[in-house]
Amino acid sequence: MTLGALVALPGRAVAAMPAHGVGSREDLPLPFHLLLIGAGLALVVSFVALGALWKQPRLRREDGRLLPMSLALALDSAAVRGLFVIASLAIAGWTLVALVLGKDNANNPVPSVVYVWLWVGLAFISMVFGGIWRLVNPVRWLHRGILAALRIEKDFALAEYRLGYWPAASGLLAFAWLELIAPNNADLPVLRIAILGYLVVSLMLAMAFGEPYLRRGDPFTAWSSLYGTLSPLGRRADRRWVFRTPLHGPLELDAAPGLLAVTSVMLGTTAYDGFSGETRWYSFVQSSSLPARLWETGALVTFSLIVAASLSAAAILSARLAGVSVRGVATAFAPSLIPIAAGYLIAHYWSLWVWEGTNGLAKMSDPLGTGANWLGTASISPSASLIAPGLVAGIQVVAIITGHVLGVVAAHERAVSLFPRRAAVLGQVPLLVLMVGYTVGGLTLLFSS
């Protein structure tokens, strides 16, 4: 069973569907070259408007419209939070039952939970409600349970945690390799090894570094928290809940070690997923004398390195044009990659989420593969209208362009905060060129057919 065979389409037993959707150039409302020109112009116009109208920092921690008191109290309620934790632990336990005791066939829900719910669904939910994985992470509660059983304080740690996002970047890259490249990656033996390995490593690091590792170093917590910065729900400086723009969160991130690395992996791995479906690349890999997975692994890592290197080069050049120190400037601009990565993620995985996410819920009703319907969801089926080619193409275009426009605004806000006012606009030109390049590249990968 392969990952590509996860999706069952109407009228077929099992059919492969690209993870990045079903849009093509024929589905676009206008010729592709006009789309590229229009997307580039949208970024340039945004840049010019920002330079003329946005000449000093505007996004502050005090911003935001207060949530209704009842909603704010619910978000902080121990009972509500406890329900989310219980639901997360129940899903984790149910999935483990299917992993250990279920049948290794296309009806087993574990691949859907791991590759669709945990990867795509968690990111989508976090963009709406914030970084919820920090609260509901089953590893966190397993770690706390072990400490409680041993009668050890919950803040116990053998060493101070100083690795920042580096373990998260490595973990996300490893997960992307498992999802996109690893052989037989939807087979239960492979998933058992991967999940057991993740649990063992996570618990060892949590025991060594304590809760600080789980807050920043855990790959799925970082994944959820960074995408969660785009949520309209947030806390202002006085810790009260507010509605705010999608840019407040990313620009409030601390310049922690590995921030550029993890954001580059978030964007680079999704870009590689689109590239891996290119016919010319696939033909080259298959005809090479070297193992295909060696080429694929190299390309996966290279895409992440290209993102990090290109942003670093543009940020350093911007700093030099503005006449300021280049130290730490690349990390300072790293949050501007988050809305871009979110746009790519939505564009690539919308169809996978709405289709296989629903199928996964149906499969969860029969974790042992006995034909049971324990949850009453076995008859649920996704709507084909949600993956209509025209709709998917429209979502892809809007997601890519919106993500890049937000990236331009985030970079501008950071620039006017870091650079002298007289040089802020000039200093952003390299970053604008980079954003246009990302936009053209992303649309080309999506609509290469």
Image (cartoon, rainbow, N blue to C red):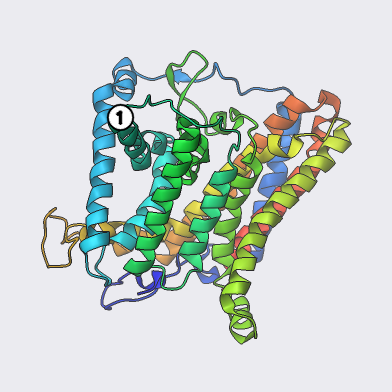
Is residue 299 left or right of 107 when viewed as pictured? right
Q: Residue 398: x and y, percent?
A: 53, 51
| Image quarter (top left, top right, bottom left or bottom right) of the N terminus | bottom left
Task: Using the rendered view, name the quadrant where residue 364 is placed.
Answer: bottom left
Residue at the spot 55% in from the left edge and 69% down from the top edge: 25
Q: Is residue 390 above or below residue 401?
A: below
Task: Give the percent coordinates (x, y) of residue 357.
Answer: 32, 57
Q: Is residue 262 above or below residue 209?
A: below
Q: Amino acid at mark 1?
A: Ala
Q: Can residue 230 be seen at all in this image of the molecule?
A: no
Q: How far across and how far down the image is residue 420, in percent?
A: 83, 25
Q: Residue at x 32, y 67 (%)?
A: 188
Q: Residue furthest top?
A: 238
Q: Is residue 352 above or below residue 415?
A: below
- Residue at 25% over, 77% down: 11
User: Alpha-carbon neighbours of circle 1 within 10 Å: few (<14), some, or many (≥20)?
Assistant: few
Q: Quadrant of the C terminus?
A: bottom right
Q: Quadrant of residue 441?
A: bottom right
Say which residue label 1 marks: 148
Q: Position of residue 359 (x, y in %)?
A: 27, 61
Determine if residue 281 is in view.
Answer: yes
